[in-house]
Structure formats: structure tokens, C-alpha cells
Amino acid sequence: MTQSLMSASEAQSAAARVMVRCDTLAAISESEEGLTRVYLSPEQLRANARVAEWMQAAGMTTWQDAVGNICGRYEATQPGAQALLLGSHLDTVRNAGRYDGMLGVLSAIETVQWLHDRQQRLPLAIEIVGFGDEEGTRFGITLLGSRGITGSWPESWVTHPDGNGITVAEAMQDVGFDAAKILDAARDVNDIAAYLELHIEQGPCLEQEDLALGVVTAINGARRLNCSFIGEAGHAGTVPMTHRKDALAAAAEWMVFIEHTTAEHDPQLVATVGTLSCLPGAVNVIPGEVQLSLDVRGPQDEPLERLLSTLLTQAQAIALRRGLTFNANEYYHIAATACDTRLQQALSHAVETVQGRSLSLPSGAGHDAIAIAERWPVGMLFVRNHRGISHHPAESVQAEDVALGVQAYLQAVCDIARV
């Protein structure tokens, strides 16, 4: 096994700092009970200020951009060189865990800290960004921070209101930003060579394999649909079983088909019926209409589309056989985001160096890398997270795993920057 750049004791010290800093950021919350830190809030600016202090201590120059991302730069051997961008997000869902997003920003700072302590510089500059909004908790629109960097904010976003009717533009003004200057955050495509993101795995795969780290192959694409079976309501006691047009029975048959077929189709595809509404909803009435949602995800678009087509075709067949009608309306569509092959190889080599073998796996959750991939190559490193629990206070990572993560991250950064 290749010797890693960072020693085990150095990695343990770095991981200990990361864990303490995750706790420090977790205390910056709009509520005393639980962690909630949303976009364009006083808490976001406080977290940015604290992260900027840590960046500066690692030898970085820092700035807050026009959409509220906190950014730092560690200069290259030659000033003005392209940068390798590292980062993740600092906002949270409501009642969040303390590692989703934050772990990636703080681990990135440790890679720069190690170089700074040794007065080493690389052919590429290293920039770190703590994105202001990935979760979309406040305004219901996601990736506002990373789309600021790529210059791909839709014009309509500035008038989008939060739950209190405050628009993005008004919220920006309240904390000292100017919606007219949003495009100032956009980076020139030639400024950045590639993007790497370390993140907790929001699933159980690494834990099942007894591994601390894994390399992401792609961020799953997703399709979401509102569906309905429409039959005929009737008296539960008087309509014979052979004469019924039971919408709920049809939906139940389809749900079992979805479960079995998705499992057999491709182990990386998932399908979920998350909501179910039964009308008229009385104990003594045959359900005449059922509305249900379908969420289908996978790391490649073609297999995902084939599965979705199979599921919808079967729904129509079930409806036809039972004398019902079936309707489906797709309301959300996001393409799969493939991680760059060269970056995957560099991360895999680094992971093999520190833990002996590497596991490749897709990400079922969305990340800032989705937006960044529209402009630059992206790579992602996953760190084991107990039971895969995320978006919940029970998120849990071990310092030993974080140490391996920082070691691998540094190794990959140096390998990529020196190519």
C-alpha cells in the first residue's frame, strides 16, 4: 500500500479539530433546540464569519461573494494559477444533523492547513467554498449557492418568497446583499480546473461493507410523478367483489409491482411511493379514487427511463384489466450527474492508499456538485455515517473515519494538482 502524505497522528489531530468545529457550527442555530440554519439568515452570516477565521488561520485569503457563499483561496506556486475548488454547504434542513455539508467544508480546510503548516504550495491554487444554500429549506428552491458560482440563477428566483412572504431579493437586502449584483458571484470557467466534495454518505452502503470511505460514481437522476387510479365508489356491503372498480386495490397491486420490479431491474435503481390519498376515505365505502406519488432515482438516465416506462405501462394494464383509468403527471425531472472519470480514479487511488480498498457507489441524494458539474469536472468522496441517517440530529460519524477522509482528501488534492 502506498504511503500517504499525511501521517496517522497528523490525521487524528486534523479529525479532532474537524469534530470540534462541527460542534461549534452546530451551536449557530436559529433555535436552541435542534440545529436549523437557513439561507440569508443572521445565523448563516455568523457561520460564514467563523469559517472565514478558520480559513485565514490555514493561510487563505477569504471573501464572501454576492450570493453569500464564504470563499477562501490558498495560492499556487505561481500566483493567479487555476484553482482546484473544494467545498460543500453550510446551510441545513430544519432540526438537522451536524455533519451534512459542514464536514466537507471543514475537512477541506484541513487539507490546506497541512500544506500551510509545511509551507508547501501546489501548481494549482486551492479554493474552498462554503455554499450558502444547498438544501432549499427557506425558499423551496435548491442549490442557490452553487448556482451563484456557475452564474445559472434563473431570473425568477429573486422574487421567490419564503414562508413569511419575504422574497429572496428582500432577504438579501436584509442581510446586506444586493440582488442586482448576483451575477458578480459567477466564476469564469477558466478560473477553476475541477471540483471535489467530501460528504457524509446518506445511506448505509459503507457501513454494510465495513468501510470508512467510498468514491461516488454519479449523483442519481430523479423523476417525480403525481399519479391517480380512478374507479367507482360504492357501498362496501352491497357491491359484489366481481363488480367492483376499487381504485385502492389497483394502487396496491401496482405498488407491489413497483417494489418487485425495481429490485429485479437494477440494484442501483430505487422507486418509492411516498404519499397515498384515498377518496372518499370512509370505512364502509369502496375507494373510488386514489392519488399517489412516485419517486424513481438512479445514477444513469437510460436505465431510469426504462424502469419508469415499465412501471407506467403496468399501471395502465392494471387499470384496464380492472375497468379503471390511470393518469400520471411528471412534475420533477433532474438528470443524473456523472462524476469525472479522472477524478474518480484519483479519489479511488487515495482511498486505497489509506484504507486498503475502495468502494464505488452512487449518491442517492443531491449535492452542490450537480450545479458545479454544468461548468467543471466533479468528484465526490463519501465518509461513513452511522446507519445512513441524515437530515436528522442522529447523524453520526467517527473521528477515525474522518481522519481517513482527510488523509485521502489531501492525497487526492495533491495528486490532481500535480498532474
Image (cartoon, rainbow, N blue to C red):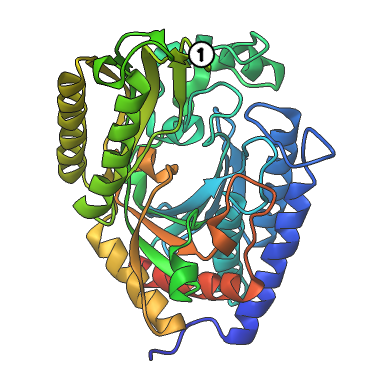
The kind of residue tagged 1 is: Val
Q: Nearer the viewer, residue 314 or 354?
A: 314
Direction from residue 245 to residue 100 in the image, left or right: right
Q: Position of residue 133 (x, y in %)?
A: 55, 34
- Quick check: can you spot residue 42? yes
Identified at 33% across, 36% down, the residue is 255
What secondary structure is marked by label 1?
helix
Residue in front for this viewpoint, 108 or 223: 223
- Taking the image as drawn, is residue 129 in sight? no
Does residue 165 appear to the left or right of 25 in the view shown?
A: left
Measuring 62% from the left and 29% from the top, which residue is drawn there?
39
Give the side of residue 43 with respect to residue 250, left or right.
Answer: right
Tag 1 residue = 158
Task: Using a 10 Å C-alpha cutoff, classify the residue at mark 1 as few (fewer than 14 neighbours), some (14 to 19) or many (20 or more).
Answer: some
State left or right for residue 92 relative to residue 343.
Answer: right
Q: Is residue 15 above or below residue 104?
A: below
